[in-house]
Amino acid sequence: AVDGGKDSLSMATLVDGETVKSPRELVISAYAAVPDITQKVTPDIKHPGSLLFMIDLGFGKNRMGGSALAQVLGQIGNESPDMDDATMLKRAFIVMQELIARRLITAGHDRSDGGLITTLLEMAFAGNCGLNVIFPGGGNPLEMLFSEELGFVCECSERDWKEVRQTLESAGIPWAFIGDTTKEKHIRVNCNGELVLDESMQELRGWWEETSYQLEKLQKNPECADEEKQNIFDRSGQEYVVPFKVKAPDANLLNRSDKPRVAILRDEGSNSDREMTSAFYLAGFETWDITMTDLLDGRITLDDFRGLAAVGGFSYADVAGSAKGWVATILFNARLKKMFWDFYNRPDTFTLGICNGCQLFGLLGWVPWLNIDPENQPRFVHNTSGCFESRWTTVKVEKSQAMMLRGMEGLVFGIHVDHGEGRLIFPYPAIRRAIQEEGLAPLVYVDDAGMATEKYPFNPNGSEGGLAGLCSEDGLHLAIMPHPERVFLPWQAHYLPEDMKQKLQQIGVTPWIQMFRNAYEWCMKN
């Protein structure tokens, strides 16, 4: 379908009293349904020591008009790249899908802005590895490296190269072998027998990121921008650890008639309720979509529920601060306040608050324990960066009292974070010490070595000790800022190591589903 884009050719905004005009350009967005969203490859090099080949749909023309190089040199150029053979483009795309489905290629990137050299470097940057690139023939090195003709670069193993080559040749696809990848973090590019680039990958990646770094300094806490630049310069890469067996979903649970009920609670401005509902449903719960209006109008109560899950989002647009409008709705209504506290005090109930829900339970004083002086209550405040942080980060499950995380200790895994006020602070330091001593801090942000950290961007908000959430003393009430409900299925993950991704795709779930299964098992036993 073609139903999006930007059709306005005259657009401007006022910044500091100066009118900034948008370039006159038409943007058309198109999309299409695919039969299997898991049949894909990402640009990052997966296996250093692999081979690289290019599919050249520009047929060696290397036209330079309108290229990024021309722009940098203050030029426009004469002839721009074009799609000279639409039939070949379609055929090449179909062959790519075949190679992906047969798992013969492990990474792929289109040749686009910046040309072939940018494509190759971006693949190495993301894969944290080096390249040995060779371009034979008598072409102009600048044109070969910086032309933005149509084409792809793909990674494959040496074992599969013969089969890949035969597939390309039998389909009549124009291809060329262009080099290999290395564990050594160094980039070497040879054109026509001459070494034209011989540089550290980290240095090149630093140059590539410099523009973004300068922009980040203008829109966030400059100290965080500096810290991020330093901490990601030579990353070792994240190692995930799954210390327990991840089991496939049990279809029999979905058909049971004695399912425990969980209320998925949302308010004006909430989101992620569908993800939360899906995770609990897959674990065996009977899920109910409950709004605060339902409770206010008396259409339903919490009496018949075993679980209460408060979802993420921006209730009442966070105008008064995160979750403050939500908590006020409860605390300033005597009937609702009694309903919530009655639910909390029942021995057969549990609660889960994620993101905005985590902030809600913190403001209610449900974690880490009751009756803390309001001035000393741990609270979630604005991120140190001063920005809304939407990232794929890594957390570790610590040994704790949390019922929903029981048996998951030692898990180091990726997770989504999306918040502007997620920094956990402790006005009274003794409370933080007690929380950690008593096992009430179940989740921490970790660095590439798997250690709890306050370093940015591994810790996206600056929480003290890297703490990402709290639980109650009895372990039945859990409040965390990251979003496990957004990554209980493998395809929801922004990144998974290749071998782990294949295993989890076969199982159908990620380790985070265990949280929801733990809640189900607790309900069935109690």
Image (cartoon, rainbow, N blue to C red):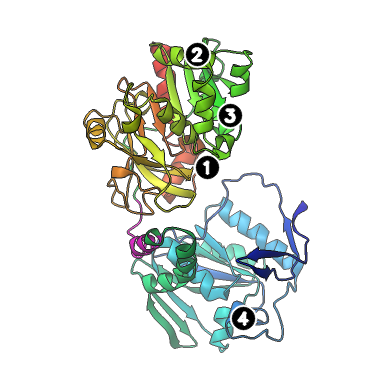
Q: At numbered mark 2, what does the secondary structure look like: helix, strand or loop? A: helix
Task: Give the percent coordinates (x, y) of residue 410.
Answer: 29, 37
Q: Whole-percent x and y of residue 9?
A: 78, 66
Alpha carbons under labels 4 and 2: distance apart: 64 Å
Decide: marks 2, 1 in contact (CB < 8 A)?
A: no
- Distance of label 2 from label 1 (alpha carbons): 35 Å
Amino acid bearing label 1:
Gln
Neighbour tally class for label 2: few under 14, some 14-19, many 20 plus, Cα within 10 Å: some
What x and y, as percent, mark residue 288?
58, 20
Q: Mark 1 points at which residue?
A: 492
Q: Position of residue 261 (x, y in %)?
A: 52, 15
Q: Nearer the viewer, residue 480 or 67?
A: 480
Q: Is residue 498 visible?
A: yes
Q: Give yes or no for residue 233 being in the magenta stretch.
A: yes
Real-space CA distance between mark 1 and mark 3, rounded to the nearest whole angstrom = 24 Å
Q: Of helix, strand and loop, which one carries label 4?
A: helix
Residue indicated by mark 3: 267
Is tag 4's residue or tag 3's residue first in the polypeptide sequence?
A: 4
Q: How far apart are marks 4 and 1 (CA)?
A: 37 Å
Q: In this view, does 8 lie above or below 101?
A: below
* Residue annotated with mark 2: 339
Amino acid type at mark 2: Met
Q: What stretch is highlighted in magenta?
A: 225-238
Instruction: Please report contact status of discs 1 and 3: CB closer than 8 Å, yes or no.
Output: no
Q: Nearer the viewer, residue 447 or 23?
A: 23
Amino acid type at image mark 4: Gln
* Sequence-first disc among 2 and 3: 3
Residue 86 falls left or right of residue 140: right
Mark 2 or 1, closer to the camera: 2
